[in-house]
Image (cartoon, coloured by chain):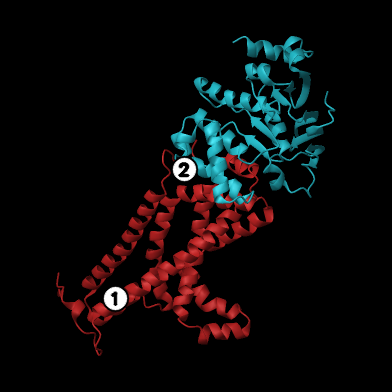
Chain colours: A red, B cyan
Amino acid sequence: MNYHWNWGIYLEQIKGGDETYLDWLITGFGWTVAVSLSAWVIALTLGIAVGVLRTAPSKVVVAISTAWVELFRNIPLLVQMFLWFFVVPELLPREWGLWVKQDMPAKEFMTATICLGFFTSSRVAEQVRAGIQSITHGQRMAGLAMGFTLPQTYRYILLPTALRMVIPPLTSEFMNVFKNSSVAFAIGVMELTFQARQMQEDSEQGIETFLAVTVLYFVCAFTANRVMAVIEKRAQIPGNIAGQH
Amino acid sequence: MSEMPEAMIKINNVSKWYGDFKVLTDCTTSVAKGEVIVVCGPSGSGKSTLIKCVNGLEAFQQGDITVKGISVGDPKTNLPKLRAHVGMVFQHFELFPHMTITDNLSIAQIKVLGRSKDEAHAKTMKLLDRVGLKAHAHKHPGQLSGGQQQRVAIARALCMDPICMLFDEPTSALDPEMVNEVLDVMVQLAKEGMTMMCVTHEMGFARKVSNRVIFMDNGNIVEDATKDDFFGTPRSERAQQFLSKILSH
C-alpha cells in the first residue's frame, strides 16, 4: 500500500485558511449533535402524539395518524431531505416560499431538523402504538371506571406504562437519529459527514479523516445508548415488568 | 321484587349485541340501596358484560340502565362523573403497576374528585388500614400477593366514596388460600350496608351476605330470587344443574 500516513493532519491548517482540520471536525460534530437532538425532540413529541392517536376510538383519527406514519416511513430519508429542501418551498404560498428560500435563518439546519424529526416521528409513533396496544384492556377499563376521562386515562395510566415498555426500541431510534443525521450533508448542512468530505478532498488524507469521523459518530450513538440505559434503569418498576400481571 | 322504591341500580330490558351475536337479551333487574346481589352463571352467560354495562364500560344497544336515577346509556350523561362514584373491582385487580400503592389510591381522588393531596393521603391511609395493608403503602403492586392486590383494589374503589360497588369475579384469579382474605373484606362491606352487585361463583359468600341471587345463562336472566329461594328451590332446571355442579365440590 502506497498510502502516505499523517497522523498529525488534524492539527494542520487547511489550505488557504487559518483554521485547522480539527476545527472543521469540531464544527461538524456540533452541527451533527444540534440536528440530531433537535430532531429527536420533534420526533418524540410528534411520535408520542401520533402513536396515541393511532389507538384512538375514532376511525377518522386513526386513519389520519396511520397516513402520517406510512407517508414518512415509506419514502427514503435522502429523498425526503430533497423534498423538504427543493419541493416544499415551491408548494407554499408565494410569500412564504420566498421567505423560506431567502430569509429563513439557518435554512439548511432548519430543513434537515424538520425532515429528520418527522421521519423519526413515524418510527417512534409505531413503537408507542405497539406499547399502548400491549397493555391489557383491563387497565384502560380500570382507569375509566375510576372516573378518569379517556385523555386522563392515557396521561396517567396507559402512557407511563407504555413508554417504559418501549424504552429499548426507542433507544435504537435515538441512536438512529445520530446516524441518520449524516444525510443532512446532501442539502448542505455543515455536519460531520459534510466536513469529512471537505477535509478528505482538501487534505487528501482519507483514512485519517474517516477514522476520526467514525470515532465521533460512535461516541454520539454510544452516548445516546448509555443515556437511555440510565433512563431505563431509573424508570424500572419495583417488583414488576411494566404492564404485566 | 325487582321494583323496589329506592332502587340504586335499575336495569330495564337491556339487550346487547357484538355484531350479529346477542350477548344480553332483555335483562331486567334492580338493586335497592343497601342490597347485596350476587350474579352467577356459567362462563359466557353474559354476567361480566351485564355488570360492565352498569357503569357504561360496555355499551348496550337496547333498554336502559339508571344508577341513582342517572341514565347510563344517555349520550348526554357525564359518564366519568358517574363512574367516579360507582366503585368497580376487576378479576385481574388492574392496579396501576407504575404507581405505589399510595398513589394508586390517591391519584383519582386528586385528579378526578379534586381533593387536596393531604386530604387524599389521609383517606388513602384510612382505607389501607381498613384492609390491613397500611404497612405496604410504599410498595408497588408487583410486590404484593394477589390477595393483597385485590384488597388494595377494593380500598382504591372505596377511596372515591362510592354510592355502590360492582365486583367482577373478584376472587377468580386468586390462589385458593387468598380467596378468604378478599371475601372477608367484601363481607364486612356488605354488613356496613354498601350496595353491592357481585359477579362471583363464591356461593358461601352468596349465602352469607347476599339478599338476592341472579342466575344468568346465554345472556338471559334465568332466575332472580331471594337467597333462600335460590338455594332452597331454584325454579329453573338450568340453575339447578349449575348449583349441583358448583356445590358438589
Q: Is residue A135 left or right of residue B48?
A: left
| Element carrying mark 2 | loop
Callout 1: few (<14), some (14-19), or many (20+) C-alpha neighbours within 10 Å? some
Q: Amino acid at mark 2?
A: Ala
Under tag 1, what secondary structure? helix
Percent position of residue A25, x then y: 28, 75
Q: Residue B220: which disc?
A: none
Q: Residue at (60%, 44%) from the top-left corner?
A: A143
In this rendering, the label closer to the viewer, 2 or 1: 2
Q: Is residue B171 visible?
A: no
Depth check, front residue: A221 or A15? A221
Q: Residue B78, percent across and down? A: 74, 49
The dot on residue A242 is: 2
Q: Quadrant of the C terminus of chain B?
A: top right
Tag 2, which chain?
Answer: A
Identify the residue at horizontal 51%, vertical 86% (top origin).
Answer: A103
Separation (CA) of disc 2 from disc 1: 41 Å
Q: Is residue A42 above or below residue B220?
A: below
Of A215 and A152, which appears nearest the observer?
A152
Q: Which residue is mark 1?
A: A26
Q: Is residue B217 left or right of residue A122?
A: right
Q: Residues within 10 Å of mark 2 (few under 14, many from 20)?
A: many
Across and down, in percent, residue A192 comes to: 33, 73
Q: Residue at x 48, y 75 (%)?
A: A111
For the residue marked with disc 1, what is the amino acid? Ile
Residue at 60% over, 28% down: B170
Q: Quadrant of residue A210?
A: bottom left
Quadrant of the image occupied by residue B42 = top right
